[in-house]
Image (cartoon, grey):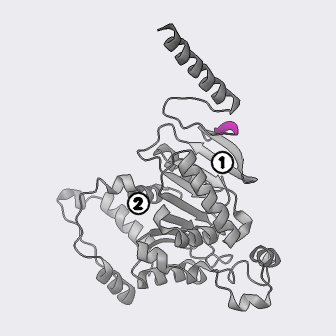
Amino acid sequence: MIKKILGRDFLGAMLFCFLMLTGWSILAGEIPFPGQRSEWNGYDRYDFKVEEREAIVVVPRQARAGNPWVWRPAFFDSFPGADIALLKEGFYVVYYDLTHLYGSPRAMKLGSDFYKYMTSRWGLSPKVTLEGISRGGLFSLNWAAENTEKVACVYIDAPVCDVFSWPGRNHPLWPDLLQEWKLSDEAMKFFSGNPIDHLEPIARAGIPVFSVCGQADTDVPYIRNMEIVRKRLLELGGIAQVILKPGVAHHPHGLENPEQILDYLIRCQPEYKAYQSLNLRGTMRNAFLKFESEKKGRVAFLGGSITEMRGWHNRIMDSLRQRFPW
C-alpha cells in the first residue's frame, strides 16, 4: 500500500516538474501553449517560434466543441474585428508568419508543418478556417487547393489572387517575389502559381470561400483578383460569396460590424454542420446561373405584421444590396 502511494506521488511530482520546466500552465478549460504569455484584447496570447518563424496563439475563454481555429498567415492584429468576435464565440485565433513568401512552395511546406504541429500537438480542429488578408490570400487559396481535406472554409479580405496584379512587375517587391519563387523575370511568362489558376480542387471539395472587398480598391483591384476567383469557382460548381463595399479602397479591411463574417464562418464548422436539420434538395446552381445572367433576383418574406415593420427584413435587404451590387 505504501509503495503504491509513493509511486503515485513520485509520478505526480515528475509530471509537475515537467510542466514547470516546459513553461506549460494548467487552467480550467484552457489548452496551454509554449512561449511568452501576454494579453491581447482581454484574451491570453502566446508568442513562440516554429521553424524559426513567428507564431501567435490567442486563446478563447471557453473553446467551442472541436476546438475550431482561424489561421492568419499574414498581418496579425491588422483590422482584428472579426478575430475578436470569433474569440468570443470560442475560436482560437492563430498566426504563423508567411507574409513575404507569396504563396510559394516553401510557404506550402512550412504551412503544412505548422498545421500538423497545431493539430497533433495541441489538439486544434483538423478542419482549419483560413483567413487571408491582402497578400495573405496567396497562401490561403494555394494551401486550401493543396489541402482540401484540412479546410473548413476560406475567409479572404481584399485578397491578392494574381501576382501580376500585385505586386506586379513595376512594384519594388517584384524582385523579392522572384527570389522567393526562385524564378527569373523571363521565366514568369510560364508562371503557374497564381490562385486563380488552381481553384478546381477547392470547388470540387465544396470548400466555401467568403470574401470582403472594396469596390474602389486600386492596390489589389477587385476585378483582377477576387472577381475572377468568384466567377471561376461558380463556373466550377463551387461556393463563393462576396461582400463588395461601395466606394471603399484597399483599406480598411473587414466590416464595421463583423456579424456577417462571424455567422458565415461558424456555419462552416464541422461541429455546427452536424446539428443542421435543413435538407436541401439538389443545389442552388440554377439560381446562381439565373442571378449571374440576369443580374437580378427576387426575395419573398412570409409572415405577419413583423414583415411590415422596419426591422430584420430591411436589414436583410440592405445586406443583399451590399453583397450583390449589380
x and y, in percent, of residue 54 in the image: 72, 52
Query: What element does badge 1 sit on?
Result: strand
Residue 103 located left or right of residue 123: right
Residue depicted at x 51% and y 79%: 199
Q: Which quadrant does the C terminus fall into?
A: bottom left
Q: Amino acid at mark 1?
A: Ile
Query: Residue 210 versus residue 201: which sits nearer the camera?
Result: 201
Tell me residue 322's x, y (percent): 45, 71
**In the image, is residue 120 above or below residue 153?**
above
Residue marked by disc 2: 268
Image height check: is 276 above or below 177? above
* Residue 250 drawn in magenta: no
Give the label on residue 91, or none.
none
Residue under the point 37% across and 61% down: 315
Q: Nearer the viewer, residue 245 or 196?
A: 196
Q: Give the residue at mark 1.
A: 56
At 47% across and 46% down in the image, what residue appears? Answer: 67
Task: State the image quarter where residue 250 is shown.
Answer: bottom right
Real-space Cα separation, disc 2 to disc 1, in angstroms: 23 Å
Tell me, yes or no, if residue 82 can be seen here: no
Q: Amino acid at mark 2?
A: Cys
- Residues shaded magenta: 34-39
> Residue 237's quadrant in the figure?
bottom left
- In this rendering, is residue 225 above or below 24? below
The residue drawn where x is 55% and y is 71% is: 146
Magenta stretch, overall SS? strand
Q: Residue furthest top?
A: 2
Dot 2: what SS? Answer: loop
From the viewer's perspective, is 20 left or right of 303?
right
> Residue 65, position in %: x, y?
40, 45
